[in-house]
Amino acid sequence: MSEQPEDAIPGLSEEVMYDAAPQPKPVMRKKFRPFRFLGLCVLGFFVFSTLSVAIHRFAPVPVTILMVERLAQGNGLDHRWVPASQISDNLKAAVIASEDAKFCTHDGFDYDAIRKAEAYNATHKKKRGASTISQQTAKNVFLWPSRSWVRKGFEVWYTFLIEHMWSKDRIMEVYLNSIEMGPGVYGAEAGSQYWFGHSAKTLSPAEAAKLAAILPKPLSWKARGGKRSGRIQSRARVVDRQGLDVCAAD
């Protein structure tokens, strides 16, 4: 019987005892796939944006990015959500007259106004916008206020969503509850109380025109009347007479 080494383990052959130790399997790192990552980001945004628009088809908008930004700047925050039935039809006619005469008939975009704005901006330093009430609602509720092509792209998408998922009456309701109407003042109810001391339900045609007149520059313009509000009031009468506000009026 042959002698075994001193470190031999009974029951194991010499070949087994002195085989090399098994090497650990190399860890396989997953390769980064940029197109797959981009696709997941696009899918995530699609799901998030669709769900957020679906929720606000029924739920009030409690706060917007602009409200938070203005609050950080020290402007305060007065935002009082009221249903569309508690907002005067005079104000609905006034904002249609001043901001978007084709609100009830377009699909979210006024293509004639866009073409005219492009032609005007090509020859003038002071730029003219062509945003509809639907576009302004998309921007005010879901996006940030600064101007950029990226934000404009998102604005187009959100406008498409709200035009297809909300009624025109709902778009007007959200718009009138979210727009800035003074330093730290947001929505028709807060604006009416701030400037005239009474509810948005009882706004007169003249008061409604004064509120609509300050929308382009709500931090610096005052709802005190003037030529602009007079023109808006005249146009609002045309809007009412021709039924251009039929999709939003109660």
Image (cartoon, rainbow, N blue to C red):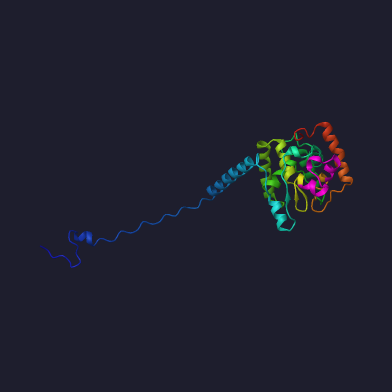
Q: Quadrant of the C terminus?
A: top right
**Residue span colored magenta:** 190-210
Name the residue located 89 percent from the left edge and 45 percent from the top edge.
Answer: 227
Q: Residue furthest toward the bottom?
A: 6
**Which of the two residues, 17 or 234, is positioned nearer the viewer here?**
234
Percent of width and height locating residue 194: 80, 49
Q: Position of residue 47 (x, y in %)?
A: 58, 43
Q: Give the residue drawn at x 75%, y 39%.
A: 86
Percent position of residue 122, x then y = 79, 47
Give left or right: position of 12 versus 166: left
Dividing the picture into quadrants, the one containing residue 168 is top right
Say which quarter of the image contains residue 244: top right
Q: Is residue 86 left or right of residue 40?
A: right
Give the residue furthest to the front. 198
What residue lies at 76% left-to-right and 45% top-to-bottom?
Answer: 189
- Quadrant of residue 212 within the rendered picture: top right
Q: Is residue 215 visible?
A: no
Tell me residue 114's x, y (percent).
Answer: 76, 42
Quadrant showing the N terminus: bottom left
The vertical placement of 250 against 28, above or below, is above
Whether residue 234 can be seen here: yes
